[in-house]
Amino acid sequence: MLVTTPTSELLECTFEVMGVELVLRSDDQRLLDEFRAVFDTGSATGAPRSRLVATITTDDDGGILSVAGDDLASPADFLLGFSSPTIPIRELPSDNPSVRLLTVGDDAEPLFRFSGDRCEFRKSGRWRRIVSHYLFLRALRLRPDLLLFHAGSVGCNDHGVLIVGPKGSGKTTLSVSLAARGWAFLGDEMAAFQPSTGTLLPFRRPVGIKPGPRSQVIDDALRARGIAGDEDGILRTPLADVVDVNASEGLPLRSVIFLEGFAAEPALTRITAGREELSILQPIATSLATISPTKRVYEMVKLLSTVATYRLVSADPDLTADLIERTFCP
């Protein structure tokens, strides 16, 4: 992330998102702060592969968003593709066939109005989070060479580990617990896998540490630094601001751990991956939108056939991390 600078009446901030330079220009400082707090993946490490420029201007009621630098044919369909239980996006009827109206949840009024490349939006609810997420994913669309997963990613020595599980299954807790022990930290919520090389690449957004049990080292560090939670009680911070981070630039993927609930004692079981494990892998929609689904399935089948796979029942974060460490890095 570079320094925010004024451009005419707009503020400009440049971010690096997995090798894509994303330039945000807006008159809303809080929008830039929102993107930085949730989606900033750190400073660029080399020349950008591509560049995306987004301009967001606002008034009291809403704003206009325009994006330049890619070839996205249907921004409305792209945004619809990222509907989730957390942010359920749906389309509303439109009297004009050239206008697409999208809203969130049960809201009967449009939150977004797409007409060609132009997007108008209404200031409602978490509009900054939704706009930020949309731009973040649009930047990731420019990396079709990567398989992007809802997963944690860490490593010990040359052993890269992908941690897969549904929301709330403990991906962040396990990832940061291992990072606190000196493991290479690649990411906690999103993971980047390069099929052509078999490599896990760093995807270090600010971590989102939820309320609940956590590593003693992490708990002590958060308390000492007085880091406060957001509106959901989630503590968002670059992990390097909490503990010393072993910031590897990439590791060969050797193992995949599928998280399977919680118990009093942790248990790690070696398994042979099959259809169930393939269905549990969670590529983000960007990965499926840029390459044919058939090719993506082939890449995931190949991934599972070339790594060791495990199921993990988690317990106390430190006990669980200790079990993982004894297994992979004795």
Image: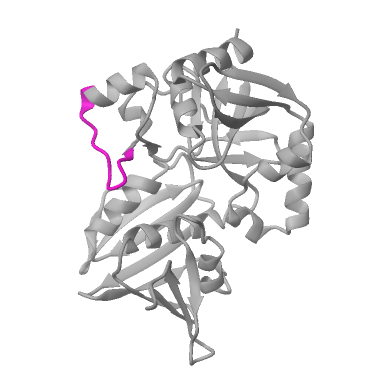
Task: Please name the residue shown 41% across and 19% down the image.
Answer: 180
Q: Nearer the viewer, residue 321 or 65?
A: 321
Q: Is residue 210 above or below residue 113?
A: above
Q: Residue furthest top?
A: 330
Q: Quadrant of residue 256?
A: top right
Residue at 53% across, 22% down: 263
- Where in the figure is residue 161, as x and y percent of width and height? 61, 27
Q: Given the current orientation, which residue lies at the most extreme front position?
A: 264
Q: Is residue 163 left or right of residue 136?
A: right
Q: What's the magenta region?
A: 224-235
Whether the magenta-drawn stretch holds residue 291 is answered as no
- Observer-nearest residue: 259 or 183? 259
The answer to whether residue 114 is above or below residue 160 is below
Horizontal relation, residue 107 to residue 88: left or right: left
Relative image position of residue 330 (x, y in whole percent): 60, 7
Relative image position of residue 45 (x, y in whole percent) = 46, 39
Residue 1 in view? no
Q: Is residue 228 magenta?
A: yes
| Dominant secondary structure (helix, strand or loop) of the stretch shown in magenta | loop
Q: Residue at x 43, y 66 (%)?
A: 105
Residue farthest bottom in this picture: 95
Does residue 280 appear in this view? Answer: yes
Task: Please give the count of numbered marks on the rendered protein.
Answer: 0
Q: Residue at x 48, y 85 (%)?
A: 99
The quarter of the displayed image where residue 142 is located: bottom right
Location of residue 123 (image quadrant): bottom left
